Image: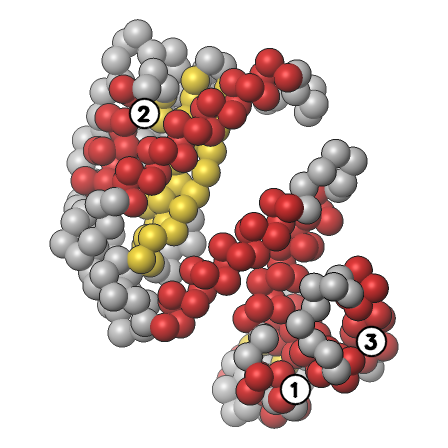
Amino acid sequence: MRGVAPVKPFPVTPRRAVPKAIPRPEYVDRAAPQPYRGSDVQTPETIALMREAGRIAHLAAAEGGKLVQPGVTSEAIDALIHEFICDHGGYPSSLGYRGFPKSCCTSVNEVICHGIPDLRPLADGDLVKIDVTVFKDGVHGDNCMTFGCGDLDPASADLMTRTRQALDRAIKAVRPGRQLNTIADEDCTSVQRMLLADEEMRKMDPKTILESEDVVAIYQPDLMRWVRSKVDETLMGYAEEVDVDDVDAMFRMLLVEVLVLSYAVIPPSAQQDGSSCVC
């Protein structure tokens, strides 16, 4: 993604038609969906339908990903995915949701999510997220994949690899009775640990980062004790998986995580009165 020009909006083509025989979700062309008042626990029959909708969504996104190459537009990707979903008897869930005009979301580079497919040609080095949701038999199946366009710079390729590894770890953490926030913590911790796994980063003194002329970061006296407790928790919970033999190295790594990734970082020019802000 380095060296790639910022994404700018391009023209969006008219909405595509869906065969009348294919059932629509109730929210299509309405201001908002009806509130869901059903159970959060689904029956085995409903889960089977969700798996099928998810399978179609996965296949549709994979087919769209095959088109990701320089010069191809996200509009062309949307057209292929739209046809694929309809051919499989599904309805593209995003189409007509709160006015959304397309059958999938294509988010390129700095566009975080829910990008609208348009006529911008993809460029060499782009990161392209394709988000597809399918409605079929009364349920939705959702997924998102990231594809590299042409030749990626090492940092972008590494980002794709490591976030996929984090996703796989989070999936393995899914089990009956486990809270969703536990799974999210596993995912987030995995990403942060992997992003900071580089030997050079491990050896960096957090103070060096914090004293950079580019940033002023917030530090709190109790932080060191809190991080040390997190080290202990991590060593107990992931004793067989942690790839850090030295406890002090683990402590240093987690301290960098907290200071750099969890606390507000603001430009010096924005700090007027020395007040702190924690996000």
> Compared to 274, does 163 lie above or below?
above
Relative horizontal placement of residue 107, taking residue 198 as reference (left or right): left
Quadrant location of residue 39?
Answer: top right
Label 1 amino acid?
A: Pro
Quadrant location of residue 255?
Answer: bottom right
Separation of marks 3 and 2 at Cα, in angstroms: 50 Å
Label 2 amino acid?
A: Ile
Colouring convention used in this rendered image of the protein:
secondary structure
Residue at mark 1: 206
Give neighbour class at mark 3: few <14, some 14-19, many 20+ (Cα, 10 Å): some
Which quadrant of the figure contains the N terminus? bottom left
Quadrant location of residue 29?
Answer: top left
For the image, the number of numbered tags is 3
Q: Nearer the viewer, residue 252 or 10?
A: 252
Give neighbour class at mark 2: few <14, some 14-19, many 20+ (Cα, 10 Å): many
The label nearer to you, 1 versus 2, is 2
First in residue order: circle 1 vs circle 2: 2
Residue at mark 3: 228
Where residue 252 appears, x then y in whole percent?
Answer: 71, 82
Relative horizontal placement of residue 169, taking residue 62 as reference (left or right): right
Which quadrant of the figure contains the C terminus? bottom right
- The residue lying furthest to the front in this view is 240
Separation of marks 1 and 2 at Cα, in angstroms: 49 Å
First in residue order: circle 3 vs circle 1: 1
